Image (cartoon, rainbow, N blue to C red):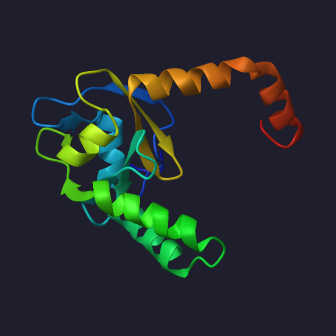
Amino acid sequence: MKGDQEGTKIDVPPSMYNGRLDEKGRLKLSVDLQKYFHSFPSKRLFVTSLEQNTARIYPMEIWRQNEKFLREHQGAPQETKNVAFMAALTGSETEIDAQGRVLFSTDLRSRANLENQQLKLYSNKGHIAVLNEIEFQNRFAMASLTPRQDVESLERNGLQ
């Protein structure tokens, strides 16, 4: 971590965390994740899904960069429209409450199938991905197919 004072940017935690939505749709964040989000100047978060099978928690500064990218991207206009639509459909602005919880919208909870189950959280390109059990198992199965070959290939290309 680069620092842990409020307002000092810190690196996103590299670990995977467990979580669960409470009865009101709030997710309790680990202390490490809270510190990461609190290191941004704005305490606002954008919670959404871009593909309906996972949720994403973005610091607002990073989400604004995505909005700019979606406005200016020239390569795939239909993909851009689709992703922007999905983000708006399930997205909501929120903040971490005094107990370290983040509220997920009702629409997001149902579309990403996040309720009444263990969730997995991990960092990915500045946001926190939230996986339901099925999505976690799918990704675990895929990652487990060729782990040695994957590592060796990446080491040849610079992984240390």
- Left or right? Give the position of 35 relative to 77: left
Work out whether residue 133 or residue 18 is closer to the camera in this orientation and state it: 133
Residue found at the far right of this picture: 156
Residue found at the far front of this picture: 78
- Image quarter of the C terminus: top right
Q: Is residue 104 visible?
A: no
Q: For the point 28% across and 21% down, which residue is it?
A: 117
Work out whether residue 72 or residue 29 is closer to the camera in this orientation and state it: 72
Q: How many marks?
A: 0
Q: Position of residue 9 (x, y in %)?
A: 41, 58
Q: Position of residue 134 (x, y in %)?
A: 44, 23
- 103 versus 141 height, above or below: below
Res 86 → quadrant? bottom left
Q: For the point 78% across and 38% down, which residue is it?
A: 159
Q: For the point 32% across and 21% down, which residue is it?
A: 118
Q: Position of residue 40 (x, y in %)?
A: 34, 61
- 107 versus 99 height, above or below: below
Q: Position of residue 111 (x, y in %)?
A: 31, 41
Work out whether residue 110 or residue 34 is closer to the camera in this orientation and state it: 110
- Left or right? Give the position of 26 relative to 47: left
Q: For the point 11% across and 44% down, which residue is it?
A: 98
- 30 versus 62 height, above or below: above
- Left or right? Give the position of 2 relative to 111: right
Q: Is residue 55 visible?
A: yes
